[in-house]
Image (cartoon, grey):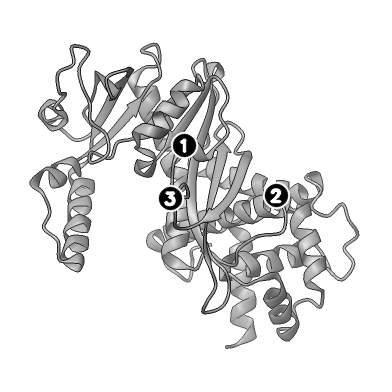
């Protein structure tokens, strides 16, 4: 490939970053150590991107960089630079989220709780026989701080997605996707004095009324006929005959286009697995259904907005998973692991931004 094309593409990518990205490197301490073999902030960022975006190990990253005449450093030196860059990568991610209107804003409701989103992702060690691991992580939505990071095997008992994977404090509000729609995890939060805000998986949660009658979800939400129409219902979760957890179902109907897309995806997956789809499953695909134990003083629109913000951040990871390998397993220490996570988020956000530009402008004039 013509080296000029590589250079031009790199400069185009740099223009996608916040205008003060160099200044942020100094303010956050990313270059508080001597640059040594690095020329400047740009050379550091280029090697980090090579590590994040291509899924290379640190050793493979520096080997490829040397072969391409980019940098000549050791993997240990790159690891030290990675540790220094955690805050830098976080601030760059926050700036891109702010651009797309997905940055969390403090308000009278968020000041009463500690709002966190939790998620997990699978990574694989290098090599044909490399083990798969699951990374469980927690991000504070107000600051995007990664306040918890944990590795478990990808399979086996007590390794799956669950609120029980995370340390919880009183008045935490934990936001999770359908993988966390499990009674055990919701009970765990309730016992810790925390709140749950989770997207419902209809096959894992059964709802009741206060009078112990079965709450028929589809029958109730079918009154939402128009796109973006929303409503809420009081429901209960039962743990045997002893414990009852009160909460609300907050539901919004998807747009027709979004609903059709979700249904097509379900049909495609079912055909691939040679399974038959239940009619109820296709109906559920038309709605976003959230269960929360937050009290009624938190309005419906606040609940839906908090989940939307979680989804905006997750989109970056989903895009990253679909386009490139999530990469070499970070097993060095907490600091480098968090920096790796922020780096992955940054790559995902840049991918989203590039795809947005590509779909809106002529390729030769998009800058």
Mark 3 vs mark 2: in front: 2
Residue 200: quarter of image: top left
Q: Nearer the viewer, mark 1 or mark 3?
A: 1
Between 133 and 306, the one nearer to me in the picture: 133
Q: Which residue is mark 2?
A: 334
Picture coordinates of residue 24 (x, y %)?
74, 47
Separation of marks 1 and 3 at Cα, in angstroms:
20 Å
Q: Which badge, 1 or 3, comes first in the chain's sequence?
A: 1
Q: Is residue 357 visible?
A: no
Label 3 vs label 2: CA separation?
24 Å
Q: Quadrant of residue 145?
A: top right
Camera-side residue of 262 and 279: 279
Q: Residue at x 63, y 50 (%)?
A: 18
User: In this view of the protein, which residue sits in the foreground, 235 or 165?
Assistant: 165
Q: Could you tell whether 268 is left or right of 76 in the image? A: left
The residue at which mark 1 appears reads as: 163
Q: Position of residue 311 (x, y in %)?
A: 41, 42
Q: Residues within 10 Å of mark 3 (few under 14, many from 20)?
A: some
Q: Mark 1 or mark 2: which comes first in sequence?
A: 1
Q: Is residue 144 visible?
A: yes
């Amino acid at each position: 490939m013509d080296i000029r094309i590589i250079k031009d593409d790199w400069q185009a990518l740099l223009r996608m970053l916040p205008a003060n990205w160099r200044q942020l490197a100094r303010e956050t301490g990313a270059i508080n150590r001597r640059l040594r073999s690095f020329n400047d902030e740009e050379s550091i960022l280029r090697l980090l991107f090579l590590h994040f975006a291509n899924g290379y190990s640190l050793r493979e990253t520096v080997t490829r960089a040397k072969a391409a005449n980019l940098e000549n450093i050791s993997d240990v030196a790159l690891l030290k630079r990675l540790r220094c860059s955690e805050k830098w990568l976080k601030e760059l991610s926050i700036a891109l989220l702010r651009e797309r209107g997905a940055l969390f804003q403090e308000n009278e409701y968020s000041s009463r709780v500690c709002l966190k989103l939790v998620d997990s992702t699978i990574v694989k060690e290098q090599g044909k026989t490399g083990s798969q691991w699951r990374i469980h992580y927690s991000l504070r939505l107000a600051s995007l701080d990664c306040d918890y990071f944990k590795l478990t095997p990808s399979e086996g008992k007590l390794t799956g997605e669950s609120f029980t994977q995370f340390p919880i404090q009183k008045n935490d509000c934990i936001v999770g996707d359908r993988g966390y729609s499990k009674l055990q995890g919701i009970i765990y939060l309730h016992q810790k004095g925390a709140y749950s805000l989770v997207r419902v998986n209809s096959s894992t949660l059964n709802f009741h009324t206060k009078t112990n009658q079965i709450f028929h979800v589809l029958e109730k939400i079918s009154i939402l006929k128009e796109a973006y129409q929303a409503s809420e219902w009081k429901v209960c979760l039962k743990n045997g005959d002893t414990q009852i957890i009160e909460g609300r179902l907050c539901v919004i109907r998807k747009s027709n286009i979004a609903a059709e897309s979700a249904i097509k995806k379900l049909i495609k997956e079912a055909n691939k697995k040679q399974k038959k789809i239940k009619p109820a499953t296709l109906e559920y695909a038309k709605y976003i259904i959230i269960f929360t134990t937050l009290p009624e003083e938190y309005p419906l629109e606040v609940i839906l907005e908090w989940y939307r913000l979680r989804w905006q951040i997750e989109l970056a990871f989903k895009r990253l998973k679909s386009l490139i390998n999530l990469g070499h397993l970070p097993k060095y220490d907490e600091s480098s692991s968090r920096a790796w996570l922020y780096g992955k988020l940054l790559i995902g956000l840049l991918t989203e931004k590039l795809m947005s530009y590509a779909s809106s402008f002529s390729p030769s004039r998009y800058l």
